[in-house]
Amino acid sequence: MIDTTVFQDKTAVYYTLGCKLNFSETSTIGKTLREAGVRTARKGEQADICVINTCSVTEMADKKCRQAIHRMVKQHPGAFVVVTGCYAQLKPENIAKIDGVDVVLGAEQKKDLLQYLGDLQKKDGGEAYTSALKDIRSFSPSCSRGDRTRFFLKVQDGCDYYCSYCTIPFARGRSRNGTIESLVQQARDAAAEGGKEIVLTGVNIGDFGKSTDETFFDLVKALDEVEGIHRYRISSIEPNLLTDEIIEFVGRSKRFMPHFHIPLQSGSDEVLRLMRRKYDTSLFASKIKKIKEVMPHAFIGVDVIVGTRGETDELFEQACQFIAGVDATQLHVFSYSERPGTQALKIDHAVSPEEKHKRSQRLLQLSDEKTVDFYARHIGKSVKVLMEKSKPGTPMHGFTENYIRVEVGNDEALDNQIVTVRLGDFNEDKTSLLGTIIS
């Protein structure tokens, strides 16, 4: 039994790096601490507890994690510092040696954070608690809102794919998930709190169901029946797991939005083979074509990695030609980062940092062109927009069903409301379309 009296009147700050899944899990940690009597520190207030939830997807992510830890220790002298997340699972001993760190928690331990806080007394040196990869088995539920309009519902964790460039399976363990029944209840709870939109998050959400003998399609159909939730978005789904039946269901769904985020990673079949991806460009193109046949107005975001080992100039040109030819809306471009222990290190032909930057900039330019073209096709249309809270004196923004960002005049009464808007021209920096509220 944990004695929570030690937490009464204590304050905490939270710092999250990385993906939406991390933000969701940090929110759940915050809720656990609040229920134990810890309040969130106000801006500028020195906290008693610091929680840093880390990412390790790239070498730069590791560096940012270390910088964040040092910064939090400096800003909150004397605070009890907890570090968790992917970097904590992969490099626990290194983090424990950082001056000021008290506890490092791995993937299996973070759900039980309270029991590792003790009496919040700092000791000489940090302690690390992690489990071996084979022992990372539990699924810890998380449905978070934080300061955002939308909720993030964690439906799955871990990955069984072991792509040659990726350390995530080593950081998060095998694929596992919550039950459909439990996730539906979390969606109902979000609706009761006033939530109108939920983003489904996970590491490999299309792989949902391995630990409960269910399927992602079953989950989608069940969530579609939850009253009170107006919108669902699928955060990211592998192309080989995005079935035609899912696409067709979203096309006629009451609540799932015409918005897909699909990792491609490379437009070259040879590079995809080196990456150990489970599809080729032909399959990817067929999924985009199917989506556009069913939902011509769908927003499609695509992840691409440039500069992986083995990506010669010729293969990059092939990739560019393929990507230019698919009807995607936006590219999320990442430069390859070598990760210790990955199979990619055995591949010949390393790409220089300068060349990675050039390739990244070229694809980002292509992305801007695709996004501007997509937005322009919707000017003059009347659409429904879920508005989000903004700072006083600044424009409000919200998103259409197909994820076009819309800017309107500030009106606090519109926060978390769905309004009908006529789309006008681009705003000054071309990040949004200007909207006129109709109703």
Image (cartoon, rainbow, N blue to C red):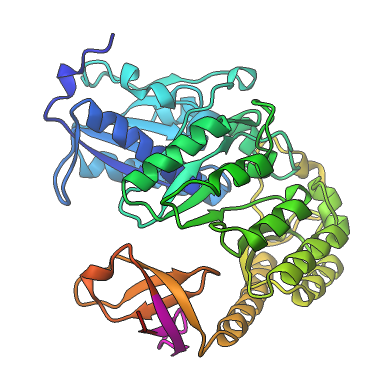
In this rendering, position of residue 353 left or right of residue 5: right
In the image, residue 262 sits, relative to residue 327, either above or below, namely above
Q: In the image, residue 70 lies at what x, y percent? A: 33, 42
Let me know if residue 19 appears in the view: no
In this rendering, position of residue 84 left or right of residue 133: left
Q: Is residue 424 magenta?
A: yes
Q: Nearer the viewer, residue 415 or 308?
A: 415
Q: Nearer the viewer, residue 147 or 191?
A: 191
Which secondary structure is most common in the magenta stretch?
A: strand
In this rendering, position of residue 376 left or right of residue 11: right
In this rendering, position of residue 182 left or right of residue 78: right
Residue at x 57%, y 87% (from the top left corner): 376
- Where, quadrant-wise, is the N terminus in this rendering? top left
Q: In the image, residue 377 lies at what x, y percent? A: 60, 86
Residue at x 68%, y 44% (from the top left corner): 217
Q: In terms of image quadrants, where is residue 98?
A: top left
Residue at x 74%, y 55% (from the top left corner): 308
Q: Is residue 415 magenta?
A: no
Q: State the extent of the magenta-drawn residues as a range.
A: 420-435
Let me know if residue 313 appears in the view: yes
- Where, quadrant-wise, is the C terminus in this rendering? bottom left
Q: Residue furthest left?
A: 9
Q: Nearer the viewer, residue 267 or 4?
A: 4
Q: In the image, residue 278 lies at what x, y percent? A: 81, 46
Q: Nearer the viewer, residue 302 or 248?
A: 248
Count of numbered badges drawn on the protein: 0
Q: In the image, residue 277 lies at what x, y percent? A: 79, 48
Residue at x 73%, y 68% (from the top left corner): 294
